[in-house]
Amino acid sequence: MRTFIFLPPVRKPTGGVAVLYQIARWLHENGHPAFLVPRDPGTWRPEDAESVSLLPWDDLRLEPDDTWLVPEGWINALTPGLQAGARCVVYVQNWAYLFSSLPENVDWRSLPVSFLAVSDPVRWYIRETTGHNPPILRPGIDLSLFHPASCAGDGSHIPPQRPAGPVRVAYMPRKNKALADQIQQGFTARRYGKAPVQFVAIDGMTGPQVAETLASCHIFLGTGFPEGCPLPPLEALACGCLYVGFSGFGGWDYLRQADDGPTAFAPWWPLRSVPWQGNALVVADADVPGAVMALDKAVGWVETDAPQWQIALENARRTVQHYTLDHQRKAVLELAAGGWSSGG
């Protein structure tokens, strides 16, 4: 049984496309015929793209025994698989785009497709809106790259050794920049007369540069939403940062509250049981005032070396051990062996 994976036409690096490459690599390295099929030859490719097989769109010839895997939001790309009678699988990496490209009067229930969910919250949303209860295929992060500066690469101990000086807060301007700016402005005003805090923008960096920057910071301010199973917060947790900010809904696959203060958002949907406890200060998506207050609390924890900070970092270390590349590889192989209909 062969697996063909559709690559959307993107020009810049995206976490979702990188995950598709990882899936193809795990299959290829374990003897499972797998091919990435870019719709546009100019589609962005990661540095290790040569480790997988790329098939031009015009050369795609699917058969009924094949699997045709397409990320959500690209329903037109399902056409080759539907026409060939192949097993069509929609990999929902962001719940927000599940219905975005459906033609008028077309429902997912009327199409011969199955689903994969990138996280438990996304699976819950798919189940509640379509009736499907898909398996989960979570992303994985490279802990040999993303780890605290004081660790040897296995994340075996924290807290990391941070540079002397002001508290450093990393953030990504591309994630709802206007809200990120508002949070910084409100926080700076609230901190008037206190020790300055340094905001460090992560933008246009390579993976190693991102890891190095995160390992030099104390806090990661996350302003991304909507999200399916966001990688930046996971990478920040792996590098020894305290996470503060939004969940994007999908972040609740692994985020858990480290504080029960008034700004702490409590999900009304069910959360799965996990073997770790509070690892972040999470506020409601787009709650700028709440994020200002939560960030101020987090900075206070760092400045006083509060027990809450150390406990959250230890829980962060436990969290990321369940999101390794090895975990992802095992899940991919299990799903492929089960016909992409069980596992996760």
Image: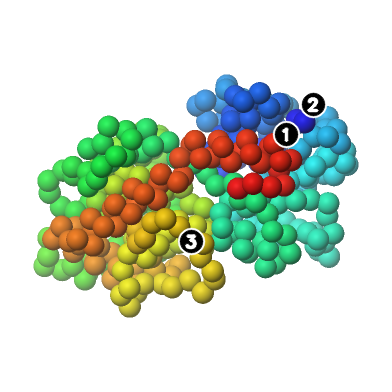
Hey, which residue is sitting farthest bottom in the picture? Answer: 262
Which of the 4 image quadrants contains residue 81?
top right
Q: Position of residue 296 (x, y in %)?
A: 24, 66
- Give the number of the mark in front: 3 or 2: 3
- Residue that label 1 marks: 4
Specify whether residue 247 is in view.
yes
In this view, 297 is above or below 197: below
Upstream in sequence: badge 1 or badge 3: 1
- Give the number of the mark in front: 1 or 3: 3
Residue at the (62%, 58%) spot, across then down: 123
Residue at the (41%, 44%) spot, across then down: 321
Assess disc 3: are there few (<14), some (14-19) or many (≥20) residues with their C-alpha within 10 Å of its C-alpha: few
Q: Tell me the element at label 2.
A: helix
- Residue that label 3 marks: 273
| Tag 2: amino acid | Asp
Q: Are marks 2 and 1 in contact (CB under 8 Å)?
A: no
Residue at the (55%, 35%) spot, across then down: 329
- Give the number of the mark in front: 2 or 1: 1
Q: Nearer the viewer, residue 167 or 312?
A: 312
| Tag 3: amino acid | Ser
